Image: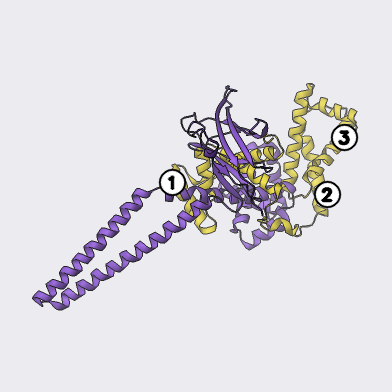
Amino acid sequence: MNSSFSEETTVRKFLLGTLPPQDCEELEEKLFANEEFVRLIDLVEDEIIDEYVDGSLSPEDRKAVESYFLRPPNRQQKLKFARMLRSQLRENAKFQVMPARTSSPPRRAWFYWTAAGAVAAMLVATASLTIYTAKLRRDVETESARNRKDQDNLAQEQALNATLRKEADALRSQINTSGSAQSSYFTLVPSSVLAMGPNDLPVFSPHPGKMLRLKIPLSDMPRQPYQVSLQAANHKELWSRPSVKPAGNELIVPVQYNKWQKGDYLVVLTGTLGNPNPMATYYFAVSNPCQP
Amino acid sequence: MIPEEFDKLLFWLSPDRETAGKKYEEIRRQLIRYFTCWGCSRPEDLADITIDRVVPWMESRGWEPSTEPIRVFFGFARNVRRETNRKEEPGPIDSGIAQPVSTNATPEKEQDFACLEACIASLSATEADLIRHYYQYDQADKIKKRRELAKNLGIGMNALRIQAWKIRGSLRSCLDECVAGKHVN
């Protein structure tokens, strides 16, 4: 899509209803004759909506959007979509950031040991300095200044340690919550990993108002789209989705099923690429639904 | 438009019924886009009014063949739009539209979000990463971060905008299909 800045500016004014009528009529013919131009219109239209949603439009443009641009229902639908997309992507990003930050204990341990070493070193330095000062009584002012500096460093290290401890506690608490206000994540375990006992099944507690999002590890299975089928213990299908693509080493599947009852359930993955046979089964149990 | 007129219109577009049907849908889509670009509040109705006006005019001309039927529709669409713009003065839209979506969960919203999440999950890892980073920031930060993103991807800002637009378009189509029940049982 090769468009000049001035062409985009003209299109933008046209869409906002601020282009002089004679210029509009020249422009409108292209709507029926030039596919490239139509794509540019669609791109600029989307960007006006994005800027409206994130609040970066000028007051004049904002007024034009609200009094003119948003009159057609399909633009109102685009606005609704833009808001949903933004909200969903940001929620996903929050969820994805958590494991990355918390799954690095070696780094944290390294930092603690480094900090502890630094503290010990500072203490030794401070003690040596004190003995040295007492013995020699020389250059007292210089040594005192060094001592103060070392103590400042020590205080900074201790403050950093405390901050890191707080951050780790906060992250631990986030992980335990495992989900947002709108949804809860539940990780399934491959049946091959489960011991054969009813008490070994992972247990999911449904919560009214929260949608279940299943995280299904693919382990050594092919990274390909799968049909995901939620079934009751008697293999009756309760819900399914025809093609879910993997995100990394797992499938993340929002489950649109809310008639949970206490009991055992299974999730069956079937390949969608010419293999209609079930490729993996995951079992889990549902406890009594929480009361709102 | 009575069925016989509609049949004549289709035949005028193409003697092959299936091709004619596709041409008709394409013309109607272009008309809707035309009225949308002009900020009309009822683009679909206006597209149908335009088609209804073309039919008797073509009838009066004995359905004279045309290599570019869209030009005929465009001429009528322009008149319909001028009449409509005279009636439709700019004014504030429904205040509900301008307000951000309420965060209160309803089954419909849950379904919409579930569909959208499934659609995002169906993107390739590269596309998902791109769109996630593209929408991570607002206002001043947005421009700076998008420049960084384009640099990291080794593409220009314009190419980044176009890629984001394409991904957005595919997500919107996926969401529409999913919400309409085509992908969700």
Query: Is residue A52 positioned above or below B162 on the image?
Result: below
Q: How many labels does the image show?
A: 3
Question: Which chain's residue wears label 1?
Answer: B
The shade of chain A is purple
Q: What element carries label 3?
A: helix
Question: Which chain's residue wears label 2?
Answer: B
Q: Where is residue A159 in the image (x, y as percent from the top left)?
A: 35, 66
For residue A238, what is the image quadrant? top right
Q: Residue at x 80, y 21 (%)?
A: B15
Q: How far is disc 1 from disc 3 in space, using C-alphas?
A: 56 Å
Q: Residue B83 carries which label?
A: 2
Q: What residue type is labelled 2?
A: Glu
Left or right, residue B8 beside residue A109: right
Which residue bears the numbered disc 1?
Answer: B151
Q: How far is disc 1 from disc 2 in space, using C-alphas?
A: 49 Å
Pick the front one: B56 or A158: A158
Left or right, residue A106 beside residue B42: left
For residue B91, what is the image quadrant? bottom right
Q: Which amino acid does label 3 sit on?
A: Trp
> Quick one: which chain is yellow?
B
Q: What residue type is labelled 1?
A: Lys
Q: Which colour scheme is used?
A: by chain
Question: Which chain's residue wears label 3?
Answer: B
Q: Residue at x 18, y 69 (%)?
A: A127
Left or right, residue B184 beside residue A150: right
Query: Is residue A121 positioned above or below A41 on the image?
Result: below
Q: Callout 1 environment at 10 Å: few (<14), some (14 to 19), or many (20+)?
A: few
Q: Quadrant where the C terminus of chain A lies? A: bottom right
Q: Pick whichever of labels 2 and 3 is earlier in the sequence.
A: 3
Q: Residue B57 carries which label?
A: 3
